[in-house]
Image: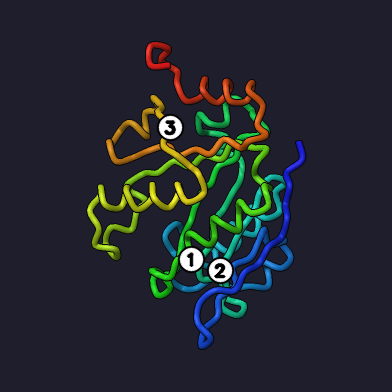
Amino acid sequence: MEHIKRFYEETIGSEEEPLVVQGPIPPEQLKEMTLHAQLDAFRRPQEQHEALVEIAELNEGRIIAATSGDTVVGYVTFHYPDEYERWSEGKMDDLVELGAIEVANDYRGRGISKKLLEVAFRGGQLDNVIVFTTEYYWHWDLEHTKLSVWDYRKMMEDLMKHVDMVWFATDDPEICSHPANCLMVRVGKKVPQESVEAFDRLRFRQRFMY
């Protein structure tokens, strides 16, 4: 299928330090950037930079980033689900995972995450796919934010709702392993009904919960 990629950019922040939120960023452009040292939630910044470039090279992959000069201070990733997860079992070419969203500690509280998502969905470029994200409390930065698990969950729900991603039920064991974990989904308005039904079958393996 065609994965539509329309590049947008928007300048936010102050005159002293303007930030450019842009994407989807081509891999050759992303290679010339560096990741902020605080972007280490998943792996070391240099290794994460390499992973972002690999995602940008994928047909379905896209990276939206907030940059200060040539330094990435925040990003969000989109790609097909990992082959070892249940979400890949349907082999759906119109099911895309919002895999990660991360902002450097020094740049939090500026609305960067919301703007990253706004740019990602701008222009209807994700209207032909189902976008989902799995929120696991063990990935949340509870230490730096000083938020409780439930306050962090609400913050993530509010963030995702900003682009019409809403809570969906599932019997996935990993999500069900803790009540704060959740599945958030946005079904694009151009997604066919058969894809919606295929996704429902992935969400529920126990038919009595369907």
* Amino acid on which disc 1 is placed: Ile
Q: Earlier in the sequence, mark 1 or mark 2?
A: 2
Please determine whether, in this image, residue 32 is positioned above or below residue 92: below
Query: As displayed, is residue 145 above or below residue 83?
Result: below
Q: Position of residue 182 (x, y in %)?
A: 37, 38
Q: In this figure, which residue is indicated by the disc labeled 1?
A: 112
Question: Image point 51% across, 71% down: which residue?
Answer: 73
Amino acid type of the residue that numbered disc 3 sits on in the rendered structure? Phe
* Label 3 crowd (10 A; few <14 / some 14-19 / many >=20): few
Foreground disc of the pair 1, 2: 1
**The residue positioned farthest toward the bottom in the image shown:** 16
Q: Residue at x 59, y 74 (%)?
A: 11
Look at the image and name its color scheme. Answer: rainbow
Give the spatial CA distance, label 1 vs label 3.
25 Å
Say what secondary structure mark 3 lies in. strand
Depth check: 111 or 204 in front? 111
Label of residue 66 in the image: 2
Q: Residue shown at 34%/53% (left/top)? A: 155
Q: Earlier in the sequence, mark 1 or mark 3?
A: 1
> x and y percent of residue 196 in the render?
58, 25
Secondary structure beneath dot 1 equals helix
Task: Specify the label residue 201 is tagged with.
Answer: none
Label 2: few (<14), some (14–19) or many (≥20) C-alpha neighbours in 10 Å: many
Q: Are marks 1 and 2 in contact (CB under 8 Å)?
A: yes
Q: Nearer the viewer, residue 194 or 133?
A: 194
User: What residue occupies the far top of the structure in this picture?
Assistant: 208
Disc 3 target residue: 168
